[in-house]
Image (cartoon, rainbow, N blue to C red):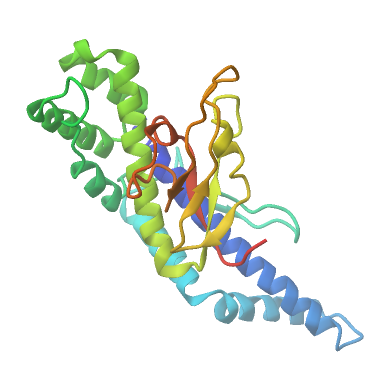
Amino acid sequence: MRPDPVRGLRQIYTRELQTLIRHARDDATLHLRNHFQRITTIDVEQIRLILEKIFDTRLHPASRDVIDRLTRLAYARGIDQTIAAIDITARIAGRPVGIAIGFDLVDKKAVENLAALQFSDLKGITAEMSESIVRTLVDADKQGAGITKITKLISADFQALGIARIERITRTALNRSYNDAAWTRIQKYAPYKEWIQTNDERTRPGHREMKGVVIETDDLFHVPAFLPTPKAKKKVPAADMYYPGDVSQNPNLAQVVNCRCTVAPRFRKP
């Protein structure tokens, strides 16, 4: 079985496609409702023609371009049909649209982001070590290695840094790089973006409060301050970010390190 290319890529692309198709579905539902308010009989063939026309003309042009582009890329990357294939299942109106896509290459923009990283400002990491870590990150990422595998590869050369610290560095670097790549794409076709948090006990309180927050694509998310532990006396300061993991506004590192949140496109506010 071929390795699953970086899971973060598949997750982000899936969310993008879900949003694009959900937008088209909502548009189709509204168009049909307006149509049937004007007639007294229902013709199945006419409904089919209407739906085809909606998909062809009413799907947001930029959205349709993204879907077409990602589909072509997926096939060009040689999907193994016995393991994963493009599977788009549109269910009845009001239900979720499920999408699964398997890729054989990673996101080029994310790879560029990883290659541009440097860790020499971290305690105990020299410029030479930083260069080696980045090289391992990029090479492993291209091969579809996950966080656990990449952590093991880096620790083989830098055991003194410790497994836990290397895993934090790896997770933080991948999350920042892939969210930056996703936000770059979102800016080109969606007017809004949503902060998607991970729903489990490991999610920091401030990020849990970001659930359902939708803002304009070029605006900054305002992430609330939070107590790092229930007994802590001092809160981690609030932070402004363009996407989860963004450090352009110099947030407290406790808002960024080990973050598992992602950013998704939206076409309208809730």
Q: Nearer the viewer, residue 68 or 265?
A: 265
- Residue 211 location (% of width, % of height): 62, 45
Residue 101 in view: no
Measured as percent of width and height from the top left, residue 21 is found at: 58, 62
Number of callouts in the render? 0
Residue 14 image point, x, y percent: 50, 50
Quadrant (top left/top right/bottom left/bottom right) for the N terminus = top left
Which residue does the image show at 36% across and 30% down from the upper left? Answer: 171
> Horizontal placement of 46 versus 193: left or right?
right
The quadrant where residue 233 appears: top right
Drawn side of residue 109 relative to residue 125, left or right: right
Instruction: In the displayed orientation, state which residue is furthest to the front.
Output: 233
Q: Quadrant of residue 41?
A: bottom right
Q: Is residue 19 left or right of residue 161?
A: right
Identify the residue at horizontal 40%, vertical 68% (top origin).
188
Quadrant in the picture for the C terminus: bottom right
Determine whether 111 is above or below 95 in the image. Answer: above
Give the vertical position of 199 relative to 213 (above or below).
Answer: above
User: Foreground: 239 or 38?
Assistant: 239
Query: In this image, 196 relative to 96: left or right?
Result: left
